[in-house]
Image (tube, rainbow, N blue to C red):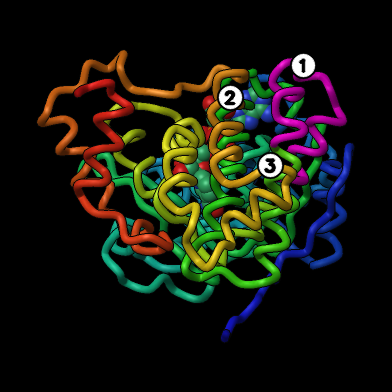
Amino acid sequence: MLWDYEQPVTIRFGCGRVTEIADVAESHGWENGLIVSSEHFVRDGTTDRLIEASNGRLTAAFSDFSPNPDVAEVDDCAAVIRARGHGFVVAMGGGSAMDLAKAAASIALTDDSIADYHGTGKAMPVDHLPLIAVPTTAGTGSEVTCVAVLTNRKLGRKAPIVSSGFFPSVAIVDPELTVSVPPKVTASCGMDVLSQAIEGYWSKGHQPICDACAVHAAGLVFDYLPRAVADGSDLQAREKMCEASLIAGLAFTLPKTTSSHACSFPLTNIHGIPHGEACGLTLDWFVRVNKNAQSGRVQHFARTLGFADADAMADAIHDLKTRIGMRTGLADLHLNDGQIADLVRISRHPNLYNNPVDVTDGMLEDMYRHLAAIA
Ligand code: NAD
């Protein structure tokens, strides 16, 4: 077995550590920083407070973007970086803020549009501005990944771009920032963590270091996600979910995600289902599809987490979704045959080919019909 491992991100983890942004910038000699932040932190004053406390290292904020950021919003952010000559970027928010900032920090050093690279196969430029990632959801692990997931709404395309230039220089993970995440977003983000861990483990590109991360992260989700959803102020549960999110990021960034992520893209794009909830929707189905793949590795994963076997883990995922208010089906959407056919067609995303079992159109159709409660 041949495998490579790379993890170039410096990690600072712990409550209260968001105040170390200025310290990180000073120690690297980075100046004139732009903080890209979710609207929530502009409204509650956190962004202004961080700028004021930065000893002049942060000079402006950008928050003009939407969840599942669009390529046009990346270009707008890059234009601000170019116009103001920013020397580094802080990305504070969920995956949407971090992914937009990663792409803008790369593209700002060119005159290009990110659309030239999104879904086109064109390699991203290697040069990029230094980036400090500060996650405020426990979900994507984007703070340690070389992935930016962007949407081109004009073309109806949501897809990841992978570039070694997208690894942040530093990740500051401060669990206190996640206390304000509403229960529904907490639940959806947590399902993203579980999907990344499990898919990273069974991906055709799996490897031992990432396997160990996947087991650790998935175990934390089963133990702590219900608590974080039930009581957002439960700081221990928040901290453990931040740990799970970061470590799941390490688990999947090199092996890549697989079937559930492939299916999540049309579920989000066409039907507006939040990313993590969309991934979780098909996760237990694919546990059953993959349960005997890779000479029993998936069974071993389930038993290591304390389940009797992979079927029992699939049952537990279904129960978890029910407990935390995530959808377990699509019946409420009243999908017709054409809409099922669209889901099948658009699920044929490159990530699907990382799945350990070949997934046919017939298998996808059976799954979507079952989820939609159509005979
Ligand atoms: P998000 O960033 O879209 O945030 C969801 C909502 O929560 C937004 O309205 C945001 O403003 C709000 N929010 C964020 N932090 C908050 C806080 N602390 N308190 C209150 N509200 C807060 O959601 P997400 O799940 O973190 O990210 C999803 C995006 O990340 C999707 O586009 C997904 O495809 C992508 N993603 C990226 C990677 C990667 O490696 N780059 C991995 C998985 C998913």
CB under 8 Å between discs 2 and 1: no
- Where are the magenta residues, as a range? 222-244
The percent position of residue 346, horizontal first and vertical second, equals 23, 46
The answer to whether mark 3 is within 8 Å of ligand 1 is no
Q: Which residue is mark 2?
A: 319
Q: Name the side, left or right, on which 339 lies relative to 127.
A: left
| Residue drawn at 31 percent across, 71 percent down | 122
The residue at the far front in this view is 308
The percent position of residue 213, horizontal first and vertical second, equals 71, 59
The percent position of residue 311, horizontal first and vertical second, equals 54, 41
Q: Which residue is mark 1?
A: 231
Residue 371 lies in quadrant: top left
Judged by depth in the image, the label closer to the viewer, 2 or 3, is 3
CB under 8 Å between discs 3 and 1: no
Q: Which residue is mark 3?
A: 307
- Verify whether residue 367 appears in magenta: no
The residue at the far left in this view is 338
Amino acid marked by disc 2? Asp
Kindly report the distance in space between the C-alpha atoms of the residues bearing marks 2 and 1. Answer: 19 Å
Q: Residues within 10 Å of mark 1 (few under 14, many from 20)?
A: some
Residue 315 lies in quadrant: top right
| Residue drawn at 27 percent across, 17 percent down | 333
> In what quadrant of the picture does the C terminus appear?
top left
Q: Main secondary structure of the magenta part?
A: helix
